[in-house]
Amino acid sequence: MKPKLWVKQVRSVIGQNAETRLRIKGLGLRGLGSEVVVDNTPSFRGAIKRVMHLVKVEETDATNVKAAMPAQEEK
């Protein structure tokens, strides 16, 4: 099974240029705290590289978001 990338938006797109906003939207992220699992392909990796300052990324092999989420840290 091909590994996938778990992506979570951790910073807002307010104040970012239009291209950055479109990249976030293209990844499937809808706002602060949203999470998606995308294929580990060069096109997705390139988009993630451009918005790395706004997202958190981990490699996973799960197919849905709930299974891919890393363990929650206790406060």
Image (cartoon, helix red, strand yellow):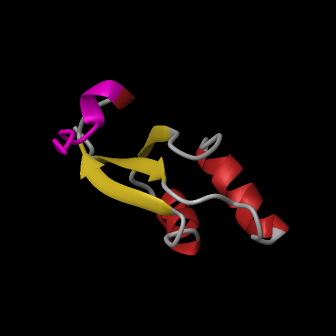
Q: Which residue sits at x=21%, y=39%?
A: 72
Residue 28 picture quarter: top right
Q: Which residue lies furthest to the right in this view?
A: 18
Residue 68 belongs to magenta span: yes
The answer to which of 67 and 41 lies nearer the viewer is 67
In this rendering, does residue 64 appear at all? no
On the rendered structure, is 23 left or right of 74? right
Residue 61 picture quarter: top left
In this rendering, does residue 38 appear at all? yes
The stretch of residues the image draws in magenta is 66-75
Q: In this view, does 20 lie above or below 75?
A: below
Please count the marks in the image: 0
The overriding secondary structure of the stretch rendered in magenta is: loop
The answer to which of 42 and 67 lies nearer the viewer is 67
Residue 19 picture quarter: bottom right
Q: Where is residue 32 in the image (x, y as percent from the top left)?
A: 58, 47
The answer to which of 59 and 32 lies nearer the viewer is 32
Residue 37 belongs to magenta span: no
Q: Which residue sits at x=51%, y=64%?
A: 48
Q: Where is residue 41 in the image (x, y as percent from the top left)?
A: 44, 56
Q: Which quadrant would the N terminus be assigned to in this image?
A: top left
Q: Where is residue 12 in the image (x, y as percent from the top left)?
A: 64, 58
Q: In this view, does 56 lie above or below 5?
A: below
Q: Residue furthest front?
A: 75
